[in-house]
Amino acid sequence: MEVAYYPGCSLHSAAREYDMSTRLVCRHLGISLKEIKDWNCCGATAAHSLDHLLAVSLGARNLALLDGMKMTRVTSPCANCYSRLKAAAHELQHDEILKTEVERILEAPVPCGVEVLSLLEMFVTQVGIDTIAENVSKPLKGMKLAAYYGCLLTRPSRISGFDDPEQPVSMDRLLEGLGAETVDWSHKAECCGAGFTAAEVGIVLDLGGQVLEAARQAGAEALVVACPMCQLNLDTRQGAIEANRGTRYDLPVMYFTQLMGLAFGYSPRVLGLKRLLTSPFPLLKTKGLL
Amino acid sequence: MPIRIGESSSSLQERVEEACSVDLSQCYECGKCSGGCSTTHLMDYTPRKIIQLIKLGYCDILYNSDALWLCVGCHLCVDRCPAQIDIPRIVDYLREQAYQQGIKPTREQVVTFNALMLGSVFKRGRVSEATLMLQFNLRTRRYFKDAQLGTKMLVKGKVNPFVPGVKGTRELRRLFRGKPAGKER
């Protein structure tokens, strides 16, 4: 299977391990990722909150680049990049006036009907959990994981059209396919504080703290994410959250692709597990996964 | 029927409805948006009240409200709304209006951060998180903010100031339509 790949800025810097593990497990499953040539930043919160036309145009340029590659299906591991690209595709498809204006600014036609999938969605709907389970050589036995989806993988539901907006289960099923146990918990799709991490860190400590506390109360030993922003907030701010709440969490926050890679038999080194601030190694050791 | 208290009242509702493709007459004030909202406990006006203020035409209150800059864009409100009113889009619209009119935001740092990020997109087409954080700390004169965390991230290889930019920057800059992106006023 061939699919266009939109990694986004984070996967080149803070979330490089997400990129590494994504490429590895895709290769393992026979998925050929074709990186969009010369892709640009999605603009994230900054663009859509200050300049709507710019936000749509940034997505439109990436869609036009896909057209040049003769690709009609694209996946992004980053929840924000995915959400922005899909929102742009949706708006351009449903608003003829906006499309004309964006094409005039871009000086290029924007293709219609591009299928934008989050990486999780691609694995679940295009590959299938059964196939993924068949590739497991080292089951994640005895691991109690909290699947954390965050906001943008499933919302807004009329655009994402994937899983339940507030009680999603796809990542849980996938992790169970890898042999792990998942916990039922309240904060699967609550917000971590997202882009406030620099400007209003108090909000991240508040919202992120609630997520970590809920995971702890549900008995999870680690959190599993599919978004670089969620990972950054829950992992790098975990120390500050602990100080703030006076509770020690020590909960590793891993990308679901890292766990897929581990279950497929890859070493923690090539999956970039050493790059996480809250080390998952003590946990992996007790489960005999090292 | 939009409530017409003055000339401005109907025009704000109509402008919002036009720009955001929403129908505010469908709102029956159930408050599920405010119940779901991630940051409602911090807001001066909850999402439900924002809709009401639009109907009443209170531009000034809305453009100066703290709520505009506290919306995190989690989309819980729109997914819970029985009328599927796209509240995040409405908040984006109000933010953009306030920003364009040069109204001083209650959370200046949020705007500073967003403007710096757009500045990076304008210059290079992509964003280096490390450079952006550094720029932000310099601009807000918090030179040692997150210094310890930054060091830890550096050790873990999570800091990469050399994210390659896009090649088609000229074409990309056209998307900004001559607006001074990232240049704070």
Image (cartoon, grey):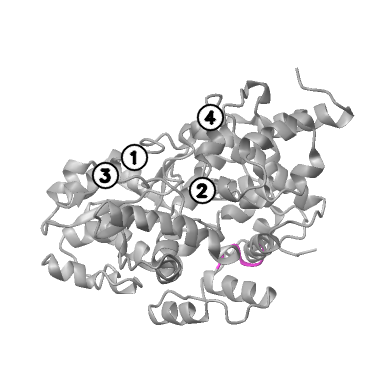
What is the crowding at mark 3: few (fewer than 14 residues within 10 Å), some, or many (at least 20)?
some
**Residue B10 image position (x, y, % from top left):** 81, 26
Residue at point 61%, 26% (across, down): B29
Lower sequence index among marks 3 and 1: 1
Quarter placement of the C terminus of chain A: bottom left
Which secondary structure lies at badge 4?
A: loop
Q: CA distance from mark 3 to mark 1?
A: 11 Å
Marks 4 and 1, how far apart at CA: 18 Å
Q: Is residue A266 magenta?
A: no
Closest to the camera, between mark 4 and mark 2, is: 4
Is residue A156 shown left or right of residue A29? Answer: right
Q: Which is in the foreground here, disc 2 or disc 1?
A: 1
Q: Nearer the viewer, mark 4 or mark 1?
A: 4
Using the image as rendered, state which of residue B128 and residue B95 is in the foreground: B95
Q: Earlier in the sequence, mark 3 or mark 2?
A: 2
Relative placement, left or right, of B155 versus B36 is left
| Residues drawn in magenta | B122-127
Q: Are marks 3 and 1 in contact (CB under 8 Å)?
A: no
Q: Nearer the viewer, mark 3 or mark 1?
A: 3
The quadrant holding residue A201 is bottom right
| Label 1 secondary element | loop
Residue A59 in the image: x percent, y percent?
Answer: 57, 48
Dot 3 corresponds to which residue?
A: A184
Secondary element under disc 2, as helix, strand or loop, is helix
Q: Earlier in the sequence, mark 2 or mark 1?
A: 2
Q: Amino acid at mark 3?
A: Asp
